[in-house]
Image (cartoon, grey):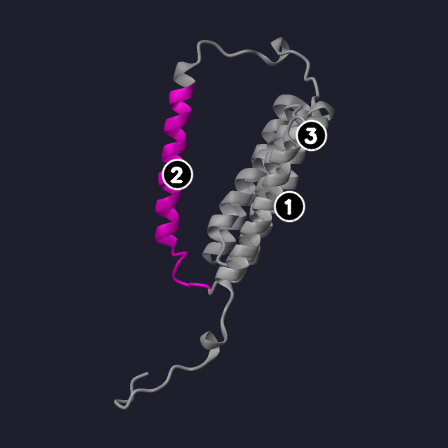
Amino acid sequence: MNSNHLFYAALGLAGACAMGAGMVTAGGPGLAFGFCAYLTLGGAAICIWERSIVRSAFSLMGTFVGVAGLFVLLGSDFLAMAQILIYVGGILALLLFGVMLTPPDNNERSLARVGATTVMIGAGVAFVVAQISGGVAGWVMADQLPEPNSQARAIGLAFLDPKQYVVAFELAAYLLTVALVAAVYIARRRRADFEPEPETPGGQS
């Protein structure tokens, strides 16, 4: 059994444990939370682990969808839709164009580099969480929170209102389009890239 099989087996076991623990502790909502958390963290782990650009991109899409699911569970339907439209529909497409049009480097994703980066990011996240948790005076229970009130209609109308955010909304769309075109132009291959290098008189190319 190679390292890929071990990685995916451990990832599947972690997902089953997360969803099982959520189901036991909170029923259906706990199961949904465990699934969204597993999709978010599992997609991020696969994105770092995989050498294939296409698989990494689709696993990153799973991470974005998992975050959107967490927003839905929190009652933030507008943030969930913005997560899908902006990150999955815009940012991920931009990354795909930029990465797939760039010549690959097989030595870029070495196991040592991936492991060191993961450890450093995990340590940074743990430090931030510890600092935030230490500054919280008291935790609020779920039954003490107010009922979620959806503001999606009001925010959507504000984005289309000429007196509010329609200009900023359209400028953001133009910015993403220009960035996508610029990424394609910068990463495109010229005809000279496919021509063999001329040989020198000494026999070295």
Bounds of the magenta segment: 104-132
User: Helix, strand or loop at disc 2?
Assistant: helix
**Circle 2 residue:** 121
Circle 3 packing at 10 Å, graded few (<14), some (14-19), many (20+), is few
Reply above or below: 133 against 166. above
Q: In this view, does 6 lie to the left or right of 31?
A: left
- In front: 102, or 67? 102
User: Helix, strand or loop at disc 1?
Assistant: helix
Circle 2 packing at 10 Å, graded few (<14), some (14-19), many (20+), is few
What's the mark number on residue 89?
1
Give the spatial CA distance, label 1 vs label 3. Answer: 25 Å
The answer to whether one can see residue 61 in this image is no
Instruction: Please state which amino acid type lies under the numbered disc 2.
Output: Ile
- In front: 111, or 68? 68
What's the mark number on residue 19?
none
Residue 87 covered by magenta stretch: no
Q: Is residue 32 left or right of residue 202?
A: right
* Dominant secondary structure (helix, strand or loop) of the stretch shown in magenta: helix
Give the spatial CA distance, label 1 vs label 2. Answer: 26 Å
